[in-house]
């Protein structure tokens, strides 16, 4: 972090913990400069940042003051889920209607599933593609198609190694994004009509995959902070013939929840007891904010896997190159079958995209980019939380994830999030209504908001408009 960002973080913490109260004057530029040994320009930069985050405001000839309600910590949502019978899934029409709202560039993209392209090193990636293709042998154009480009496989294996996991490159299958990896993994271990344990709420693409493959969903509630409810999962495994599970152990979409190491161990013990294959969707692995994890992200359940039950799926779409559509699956005991399934379907991801990513990972400063991306997302999260605090109804509940770029808002119970979606769209604002995250189209008074785009005046106005719509409902 830069010096002004560190100073801003210190002031933010004082506000969030109530040491600097709403309406109270923050130290003057001169006082802060002298007390912290930093230049006045550094203090100004920090205060501008805190203004953009909605924590302080300037008063003419008086200085900077803590904004009203800036220190209030909003309660986290309740995720109440009554035990449901296994259900067929039919959400695609609803999902497609929501996704269609994102095609207009003038719409404020709170419903987006991706961060802003402005946050990615696209020009540097283009340079890597040019250099990588220049070095690519004519033989490799054919030989690397089905297995994945060896340099990319090696770079991915090195990322695992840095995180304390020894993974042979032979266990990796390069795919067309993480969605193909997850599709292949599920096809490998299920047949139409089988039961699959999924999260509730779950990423809507999970539901679409189950719908396409004619699989039935067993919803397991997710705590906003602690992750999947292991007691409910254990009960369902004891009473239902579940064939596979699909979970996000880290920064779950849409809640942002992460399992602790102890809970990951409990989950893996359940998998072993029931010999149950698990798809571990870990596409947000690199987007953590936790300063204690600066060196490497938290380890996935895959790190515990000695029996080959866990199929760990990752992607560069959320952290580096959305349009390149390059992901992978570390498939354990299912590697050979998944490789064959892939050969029978899409054969290979784009080879130019693979060589570009391989070159960038080796030479482009990937970790430097990730540090900048995490800081941008954390700053944008703070701004959105402050805006929810200012504009939304007082009984709104919201998650406080330590990474990713989504907030899950539980609104007053009388709110219909599908109606709110249509009203917001009429004002040029997209959002993701709760029912698209449920096989049974529950969570009707919840929404998911993305803070993946740089915060600006349009973002602030959009949050104010949403607040007005909610209070008028």
Image (spheres, rainbow, N blue to C red):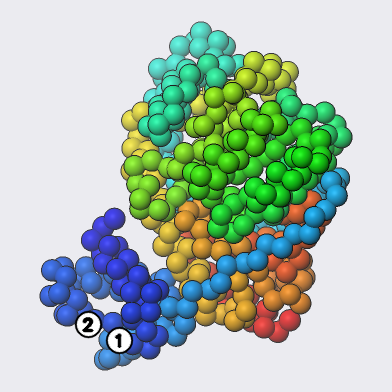
| Figure quadrant of residue 188 | top right
In the rendered structure, the answer to whether residue 391 lies left or right of residue 414 reads left
**Disc 1 element:** loop
Which quadrant holds the N terminus?
bottom left
Percent position of residue 65, x then y? 34, 85
| Figure quadrant of residue 193 | top right
Please count the marks in the image.
Answer: 2
Q: Residue at x 26, y 67 (%)?
A: 7
Which quadrant holds the C terminus?
bottom right
Percent position of residue 399, x then y? 56, 64
Compared to residue 459, the image places residue 101 above or below, namely above
Residue 429 showing in the rendered view: no
The residue to which callout 1 is attached is 25
- Label 2 Cα neighbours within 10 Å, binned few <14 / some 14-19 / many ≥20: some
Percent position of residue 334, x then y? 65, 21
Using the image, tell me which numbered label, if any, was put on residue 28.
2
In the rendered structure, the answer to whether residue 91 lies left or right of residue 222 reads right
Residue 334 showing in the rendered view: yes
Foreground: 69 or 53? 69
- Label 1 Cα neighbours within 10 Å, binned few <14 / some 14-19 / many ≥20: some
In the rendered structure, the answer to whether residue 348 lies left or right of residue 80 reads left
Q: Residue furthest top?
A: 139
**Disc 2 element:** loop
Q: Circles 2 and 1: CB distance less than 8 Å?
A: yes
Percent position of residue 470, x then y? 68, 78
Q: Residue at x 50, y 70 (%)?
A: 385
| Figure quadrant of residue 469 | bottom right
Q: Residue furthest bottom?
A: 61
Compared to residue 407, the image places residue 173 above or below, namely above
């Amino acid at each position: 972090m830069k010096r002004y960002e560190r100073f801003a973080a210190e002031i933010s913490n004082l506000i969030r913990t109530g040491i600097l109260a709403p309406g109270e004057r923050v130290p003057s530029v001169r006082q802060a400069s002298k007390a912290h040994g930093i230049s006045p320009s550094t203090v100004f930069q920090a205060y501008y940042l805190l203004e953009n985050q909605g924590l302080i405001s300037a008063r003419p000839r008086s200085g900077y003051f803590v904004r009203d309600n800036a220190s209030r910590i909003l309660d986290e949502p309740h995720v109440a889920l009554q035990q449901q019978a296994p259900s067929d899934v039919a959400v695609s029409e609803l999902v497609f209607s929501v996704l269609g709202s994102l095609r207009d560039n003038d719409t404020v993209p709170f419903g987006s599933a991706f961060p802003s392209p402005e946050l990615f090193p696209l020009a540097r990636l283009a340079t890597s593609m040019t250099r990588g293709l220049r070095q690519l042998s004519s033989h490799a154009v054919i030989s690397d198609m089905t297995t994945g480009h060896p340099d990319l496989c090696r770079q991915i294996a090195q990322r695992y190694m840095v995180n304390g996991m020894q993974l042979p490159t032979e266990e990796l299958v390069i795919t067309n994004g993480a969605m193909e990896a997850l599709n292949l993994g599920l096809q490998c271990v299920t047949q139409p009509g089988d039961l699959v344990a999924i999260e509730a709420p779950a990423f809507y693409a999970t539901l679409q995959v189950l719908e396409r493959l004619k699989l039935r969903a067993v919803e397991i509630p997710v705590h906003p902070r602690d992750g999947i409810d292991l007691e409910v999962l254990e009960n369902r495994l004891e009473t239902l013939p579940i064939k596979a599970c699909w979970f996000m152990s880290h920064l779950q979409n849409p809640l942002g929840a992460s399992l602790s190491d102890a809970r990951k161990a409990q989950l893996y013990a359940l998998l072993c007891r029931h010999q149950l294959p698990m798809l571990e969707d870990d596409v947000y692995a690199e987007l953590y904010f936790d300063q204690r994890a600066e060196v490497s992200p938290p380890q996935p359940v895959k790190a515990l896997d000695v029996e080959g039950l866990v199929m760990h799926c990752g992607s560069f779409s959320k952290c580096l190159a959305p349009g390149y559509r390059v992901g992978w699956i570390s498939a354990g005991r299912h590697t050979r079958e998944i490789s064959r399934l892939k050969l029978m379907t899409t054969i290979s991801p784009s080879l130019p995209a693979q060589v570009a990513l391989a070159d960038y990972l080796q030479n482009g400063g990937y970790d430097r980019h990730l540090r900048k991306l995490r800081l941008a997302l954390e700053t944008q999260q703070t701004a959105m939380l402050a805006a929810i605090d200012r504009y939304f109804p007082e009984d709104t509940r919201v998650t406080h994830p330590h990474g990713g770029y989504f907030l899950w808002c539980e609104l007053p119970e009388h709110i219909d999030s599908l109606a709110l979606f249509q009203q917001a769209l009429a004002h040029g604002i997209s959002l993701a209504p709760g029912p698209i995250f449920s096989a049974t189209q529950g969570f009707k008074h919840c929404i998911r908001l993305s803070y993946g785009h740089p915060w600006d005046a349009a973002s602030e106005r959009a949050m104010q408009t949403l607040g007005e719509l909610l209070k008028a409902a």
